[in-house]
Amino acid sequence: MSVGWLLPLLLLAVVAVASVVVVRVSRRRNLLLRRLETVIPAATVPGTEAEPLRSIRLQRPQGTQLDRAAMLLRMPQNLPLANVVSPAVIFILATGGGLGAIWIVHYLASWSLSMLGGVVVWIMLARGMFGWELARYRAKLLGQLPDTVQLVVSAIRAGLPVFEAFRAIADEMPSPTRDEFVRVNNEMALGVAAEDALLSMHQRTGVTEYAIFAVTIGVQARSGGRLAETIQNLAETVRERLAIAARARALAGEAKISAYIMGALPVISAGLMSLVQPAELAPLFNDPRGVRMFMIGLITLFLGVVTMRQMIRGATRD
């Protein structure tokens, strides 16, 4: 291995090791904070002091630098079921992609710019893979939310308290809703209010509807009202949102096919030309000017695919 490759490789190795440390420290810290948050309310003796009225407004969670780094990479924190692929495998794949980006960019620019490009590609790949896992987990939770809310409505109309309704969800709903409500029930068993447990679930998963659910229960507990009808309206709203999102994805199917064709067309054309006239593509690999043109083509193709993907996701975002 040449000396020029040693510095970028060491840089990416340091970034990968630091990311693994961020994962482990962040998970341990979140687990400790979660245990403290669940134990402290249970240890408080009612009547010893006047308890301030809790706010039901959504607050942005405060975190350390490690938490911010995990948020930058969109890592699923405190969500073990969201990890389809091991974080170590994701970091290895991202490191391979970063090395490939360094190898491509160094034909067009200096080593400093190539190392910067490798780090940027590493972050983009890790963020993309973690984001895919998190989006997949959220989509499952959101898809099961109407049935979950309907089960709560049925339990409340039958005269059961909210705690029993949540216990029924933990027993009857499929994963991941079942696992999340097992955690909610454990927190409520330790003295946490139902709205606070649901807000914690919203902060873990990022599903906004659970925050609305928590605020609904909190308002009903403070001022009273017909909880079943309010939650029923929430279930209908979620169903309508899911239907509109599904229709948007169906309408964007043509755009997705066009993006796939446009992204694959240069590769297919180059493969067919190499079979018919192999000498026509030889300058792209033998001549330094051809190599630069080939690298520029790969970079612009990648940027075009990313741009089309972002446009389609922005148009279909619910």
Image (cartoon, helix red, strand yellow):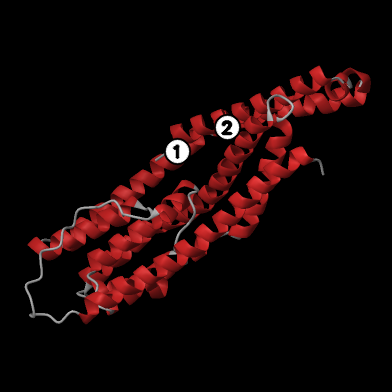
The one nearer the camera, 42 or 158, is: 42
Question: Where, quadrant-wise, is the N terminus in this rendering?
Answer: top right
Residue 243: image location, x then y, percent: 40, 44
List the residue tagged with mark 1: 247
Q: Is residue 74 above or below residue 262?
A: below
User: What residue appears at the point 55 percent right and 54 percent down from the top-left corner?
Assistant: 19
Q: Is residue 275 above or below residue 216?
A: above
The amino acid marked with disc number 2 is Val
Q: Is residue 17 above or below residue 304?
A: below
- Residue depth check, mark 1 versus mark 2: number of the one nearer the observer: 2
User: What residue appears at the point 26 percent right and 58 percent down from the top-left corner?
Assistant: 213
Residue 225: image location, x then y, percent: 10, 61
Real-space CA distance between mark 1 and mark 2, rounded to the nearest whole angstrom: 23 Å
The one nearer the camera, 264 or 155, is: 264
The amino acid marked with disc number 1 is Arg
Using the rendered image of the protein, determine whether residue 307 is visible from the camera's viewpoint: yes
Residue 309, located in which quarter of the rendered image? top right
Crowding around mark 2 (Cα neighbors within 10 Å: few <14, some 14 to 19, many 20+) is few
List the residue tagged with mark 2: 306
User: What residue appears at the point 83 percent right and 28 percent down from the top-left corner?
Assistant: 271
Residue 143: image location, x then y, percent: 43, 54
User: What residue appears at the point 83 percent right and 22 percent down from the top-left corner?
Assistant: 284
Question: Where, quadrant-wise, is the C terminus in this rendering?
Answer: top left
